[in-house]
Amino acid sequence: MNSLEKAIDFLKKENATLVAINKDEIYISHARGVAPIIEKIDKNPSFFCGASVADKVIGKAAAMLLSKYKIKELHTSLISEIALEYFEKTPISVTYDNLVPNIINRDKTDICPMEKCVLSTNDENEAEKLIRATRKKLLKK
């Protein structure tokens, strides 16, 4: 079983939201949204470089973060069209189960605020700043 297959297996067995495997280190998270990615970046910015990642939901915000931190490959249960379009411009190998026009917010009333905050940029550094600022605002509510 390769790293991506292991990550997918852990995602299902652990009912996790994100599993990333890089060499012998396995990172499993049950946090929602972009939180698992941001939390790992804050603890170990180089961890994702070359990692195999399995995730439940990938929108453009998560796609841009994972691309910026140089993952090798990704499998996701659900991906937005704009996230997939973004990945097509990268060397990252992506597989998915379901493709949707947009990731929807938790109340199902609008586009996810993280996806919305990066709609107008393709600059990964700018995207990370926008994601962090949006996340900070949302956490204050």
Image (cartoon, rainbow, N blue to C red):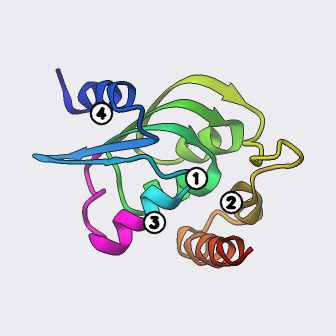
CA separation in Å, label 2 and label 4: 24 Å
The location of residue 103, given as percent across then percent down, is: 72, 42
Q: Is mark 3 on a helix, strand or loop?
A: helix
Give me the disc on residue 114: 2
From the image, give the main secondary structure of the stretch colored magenta: loop
Q: Counting residues from the N terminus, which is met first, the one under dot 4 or under dot 3?
A: 4
Give me the disc on residue 33: 1
Identify the amino acid type marked 2: Met
- Which residue is denoted by mark 3 in the rendering? 38
Q: Which residue lies furthest to the right in this view?
A: 109
Q: What's the magenta region?
A: 39-51
Kindly check if marks 3 and 1 are in contact, taking CB atoms under 8 A apart as contact: no
Identify the amino acid type marked 1: Gly
Q: Looking at the image, which residue is at 48% across and 52% down?
A: 31
Identify the amino acid type marked 3: Ile
Kindly check if marks 2 and 4 are in contact, taking CB atoms under 8 A apart as contact: no
Give me the disc on residue 73: none
CA separation in Å, label 4 and label 3: 18 Å
Q: Looking at the image, which residue is at 57% across and 43% down?
A: 58
